[in-house]
Amino acid sequence: MKQNNIKLPLIKHFFTLLFVMLIGMSSCKPVIIKEDLRIENLLKQMTLKEKVSQLNLITALDDNNNELDVIDKIKNGEVGHILKSNGAQNNLELQKIAINQSRLGIPIMFHEDVIHGYKTIFPSPMGEASSWNLEMIEKTAHIAAIEAAASGIQLTYAPMVDVTHDARWGRIVEGAGEDPWLGSEIAAARVRGFQGKDLSDSSTIMACAKHFIGYGNALAGIDYNIGEFSERMLRETYLPPFKSAIDEGVGSVMVAYSAYNGVPASANKWLINQLLREELGFDGMVISDWGTISNLIKSGNAINENDAAQQAIEAGVDLDMVSEIYVHQIEQLIRDGSVDIELINMAVRRVLKAKFDLGLFDNPYVYFDTIREKEVVLCEDHLLIARQAARESMVLLKNNNLLPLSKEIKTIAVIGPLANRKKDMMSWWGANHSQGNENDVVTLLEGIKSAVSKQTKVFYSEGVILNGFEKSGINLIDEAVAVARKADVVVLAVGEEYWMSGEGASVSEITLPGSQNELIQALARINKPVVAVLINGRPYDIRTPVAEFDAVLEAWQPGTMAGHAISDLLFGDYNPSGKLPVSYPYNGGQIPIFYNQKRSSHDFEGVNLTDRYKNNYLDITTKPLFSFGFGLSYSKFEFSNLRLEKDTIGMNETTKIFVDVQNISDRAGEEVVQLYIQDMVSSAIRPAKELKDFSRISLKSGELKTVVLDINPEKLKFYNSEMNYVLEPGYFSIMVGNSSQNEDLLVKTLHVK
Ligand code: BGC
């Protein structure tokens, strides 16, 4: 590795000396003193143009993935950051230009959307969230960081921590579901995974919590649409995962395309300066989303680029992603006195600090290691973890004793448009925008073939052609039915193509696209045992397969090891343990649907056609098809003996909650024990249920464990009628079980006084 050759002047040595003296004299953290001095020292040498360049984030690929020429911009000292530039060798060349050919030799920071893996693709974030396994989620983020860091990347635009209640919104796939508490735990795990303990370690990268804030509230489920929401909703639903990421030390935050209270996030002083920086204490970089500074003009909030730049920098946006408005406008704004130079200095300080923290000044080439890149990317260990993560991410929704299948089965028909697809196993990010390569993916058909015995005959039929929303390949159904008739069991893979969820992928209906329902109905008519395997980013209306087939497995988009991981579940090498992080709607008309809805004056009773004065639809149930937290196992678990360490606690006290869980089946398995609360009387309406703790446990056949969860004052607090965050004394229901639905929960009461 080359050593830092940044061109710092002699004054650096004075500060180094001072630093050495300070280490001896003070008990303060020496690194901070050293870094601050170096930042100030550098800032003093920078021209205004050089400062503004540090706020400029350009892309190496345009919207259509065509390469753009970034070299001149680097030489001219116009660029502080580049996104969509990958590969150790490639980025090394660019970094060398920045170091050797720009006046101050300030290193570039390379950003990328490393969303669920770099080249080893893990399950989509929605899938990973279904594992409720924080250690695993941290581990996959760490592996993604190792691969990305070795390939020249220092910052990822992840985790996305947007909570949403709308399966029509394609970006539901990228988040952790509908619950702020689970979302917060997962946000923290992902930040820990990406950033590790030391950002300057060459196997960690900086994380970015996005999109600040309320982006998941897209009106009518249409991406980029502005939904109105209250400050209460912001604080109760959207803010907790951001707070959690910030408390975990996330290095950057990206603002949303959307607006809050009528003001776009990129120009919203209250959101960024007040809420994010002052209230939450976030002191890292704030990054605009793609072109959101220029979007201020499109949405009619700014009259021109000059105005847009002023609004964004004054609101607290540090980096301008791709609109290149800062680089063209800020000098003018400073010259004519419209913007205070100190605002620019503050933003530049944050950028330089990030670069120092990443170790880029001390060793600007540390992330561009071609040998390490070859060693770590898609290595055997990473693939093993990808297989395990994918197994844990799948949710068994129905099983009439069909699963697990025997590997000795004589004949098996693998049917469906997704049974032998590769790219569709990876999600829009993994397949199209990250570095995932479809050739590395194991299809379901391949996985099944490698799992079954040598004697087993595996038949395959595509069934119908999945080509977006088109009704294609209906003429193939007869052949699929004939194939199914020959087999002892059918494995049917249906769902969506990779691009059908993700950014800009909104749908008005959540019915399975194309001719898949026709295929499902045809197979339902022949009375064969069928297991439906769902490959999808968002929940779909799956009433027909659930009604007609013996088993339904939600596999989400499992990533590189898809086929092996699904087969592990189908043939019992892994016992399903995933739990839904979203309510699975009965149909699209129920959207928005989520388990932690506010209590209502009228009862929720599912469907009630006779009594109109209930909280019901007249035509369908108000219950989801599958509840948040639901997921089956091949084992059977019994919950009993829910008890509280203390039935009554003071306002500052904590109590443990105990429950006995026994595996009453003959198969070892894993269960997620979930704790929900309900504040029984409160000054502002509270949700019917709120998740407040969980524990993932393994139990051998017959084994009983006492699971200990806890309730502390922080978990009982809420925004009261005056919008103060308080704990109101009174009674709370404590509910523990293996899903959020009433019939799965044991209940006790806790008194707080
Ligand atoms: C998305 C971000 C993403 C960025 C860069 C935007 O359109 O909203 O989530 O990180 O593009 O690819």
Image (cartoon, rainbow, N blue to C red):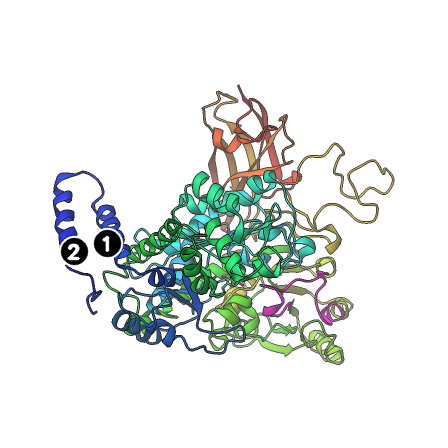
Contact, mark 1 vs mark 2 (Cβ under 8 Å): yes
On screen, residue 154 versus residue 137, left or right, reads: left
Residue 598, horizontal then vertical, whole percent = 66, 37
Residue that mark 2 sits on: 11
Question: What separation in Å lies between label 1 and label 2 (alpha carbons)?
Answer: 8 Å
Residue that mark 1 sits on: 41
For the residue carrying disc 1, how many other residues have a C-alpha within 10 Å: few (<14), some (14-19), or many (20+)?
A: some
Tell me the kind of residue under disc 1: Asn
Residue that protrudes farthest toward the top in the picture: 753
Residue sitting at x 70%, y 48%: 624
What are the residue bounds of the magenta stretch? 492-520
Q: Earlier in the sequence, mark 1 or mark 2?
A: 2
In the image, is residue 519 part of the stretch drawn in magenta?
Answer: yes
* Visible residue check, residue 620: yes
Residue 463, horizontal then vertical, whole percent = 69, 76
Tell me the kind of residue under disc 2: Ile
